[in-house]
Amino acid sequence: MDEQPLVLHARDARGVVTLTLNRPQAFNALSEGMLDALQRALDRVAADDTARVVVIAAAGRAFCAGHDLKEMRAEPSLGYYERLFAQ
């Protein structure tokens, strides 16, 4: 199965960077993996001296449903929440 990236990264010639949340089937809920991918994408943008502005967009019909509650309920340990909110 060909897995799609959780965050799509595009940059135009003017320095406009668009990061697109890409979990439309879950209304772009912020899973731990999505948050990690978003942080990595933002780190790349921060290191790019030609980037002038960042637009955060989303695939599908919802921008973002918030945290992924299914994932949070599946792992109710303190360690999960420490990792989640340490970002």
Image (cartoon, grey):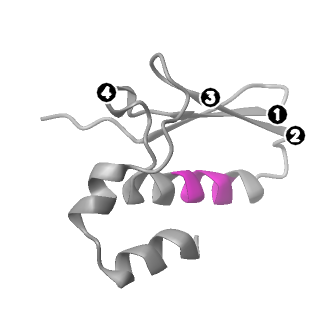
Q: Quadrant of the C terminus?
A: bottom right
Amino acid found under the numbered disc labelled 1? Gly
Label 4 Cα crowd, 10 Å radius (few <14 / some 14-19 / many 20+): few
Q: Secondary structure at mark 2?
A: loop
Marks 1 and 2 sit apart, C-alpha to C-alpha, by 5 Å
Q: Are marks 1 and 2 in contact (CB under 8 Å)?
A: yes
Q: Is residue 30 above or below residue 9?
A: below
Q: Position of residue 48 (x, y in %)?
A: 76, 52
Marks 4 and 2 sit apart, C-alpha to C-alpha, by 31 Å
| Residue mark closest to the camera, 1 vs 4 | 4
Label 1 Cα crowd, 10 Å radius (few <14 / some 14-19 / many 20+): some
Marks 1 and 3 sit apart, C-alpha to C-alpha, by 16 Å
Amino acid found under the numbered disc labelled 2? Arg
Amino acid found under the numbered disc labelled 3? Ala
Q: Quadrant of the N terminus?
A: top left
| Residue mark closest to the camera, 4 vs 2 | 4
Q: Secondary structure at mark 1?
A: loop
Q: Using the image, tell me which numbered label, if any, was put on residue 52.
A: 2
Q: Position of residue 18 (x, y in %)?
A: 67, 31
The chief SS type of the magenta part is: helix
Q: Is residue 66 above or below residue 2?
A: below
Q: Are marks 1 and 4 in contact (CB under 8 Å)?
A: no
Dot 1 or dot 4, earlier in sequence: 1
Dot 3 or dot 4, earlier in sequence: 4
| Residue mark closest to the camera, 3 vs 4 | 4
Quickly name the residue at label 4: 25
Dot 4 or dot 2, earlier in sequence: 4
